[in-house]
Image (cartoon, helix red, strand yellow):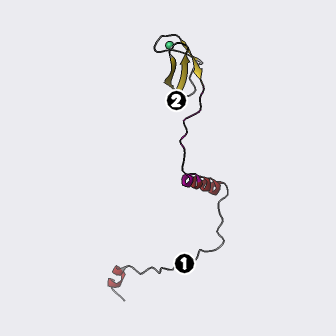
Amino acid sequence: MATYEYLCSRCGPFDVKLAMGTAPEVYGCPVCAGSARRVYSSPGLLPTSNVAAALHDQEEQAREAPAVVSEVPPRSGVRQQPHPALSRLPRP
Ligand SMILES: [Zn+2]
């Protein structure tokens, strides 16, 4: 369903929810039953934060041209300790 905006010359603007692509150019006004003309307006886009926009751009760029890794990244400074339960296992 999509919301379409119509303008009645007597009653003013009103919205109608219809299946996408089925909105007629003229629709019956729900108040006076007169004919209302379809009005085209900008979609309600939500502003995004700079961080979200940067992440979106980065994701789009990675989709088009992913970064190629040519070597194994260096290990981090923290060495992982073995799980403590491993010391309780029987030894041969
Ligand atoms: Zn009307």
Closer-to-camera residue (2/66): 2
Q: Residues within 10 Å of mark 1 (few under 14, many from 20)?
A: few
The reply to whether the residue tagged 2 has its Cβ within 8 angstroms of ligand 1 is: no
Q: Residue at x 66, y 65 (%)?
A: 68
Q: Secondary structure at mark 2?
A: strand
> Reading the chain from its start, which is encountered first: label 2 or label 1?
2
Magenta-drawn segment? 40-53
Q: Residues within 10 Å of mark 2 (few under 14, many from 20)?
A: few
Q: Which mark is residue 3?
A: none
Quarter holding the C terminus is bottom left
Q: Secondary structure at mark 1?
A: loop
Q: Residue at x 58, y 20 (%)?
A: 38
On screen, residue 87 above or below 55: below
Q: Position of residue 14 (x, y in %)?
A: 50, 21
Q: Residue at x 52, y 10 (%)?
A: 34
On screen, residue 19 above or below 28: below
Closer-to-camera residue (48/84): 48
- Relative side of 58 to 10, left or right: right
Rendered image quadrant of residue 27: top right
Q: Residue at x 56, y 22 (%)?
A: 23
On screen, residue 26 above or below 57: above
Residue at the disc numbered 1: 75
| Magenta region includes residue 89 | no
Classified by dominant secondary structure, the portion drawn in magenta counts as loop
Q: Position of residue 7 (x, y in %)?
A: 55, 19
Measured in 3D between alpha carbons, the distance from the residue under mark 2 to the one under mark 1, in whole angstroms, is: 52 Å
Type of amino acid at the residue the image marks with label 1: Arg
Residue at the disc numbered 2: 2
Rendered image quadrant of residue 54: bottom right
Type of amino acid at the residue the image marks with label 2: Ala
Q: Position of residue 29 (x, y in %)?
A: 50, 14
Rendered image quadrant of residue 64: bottom right
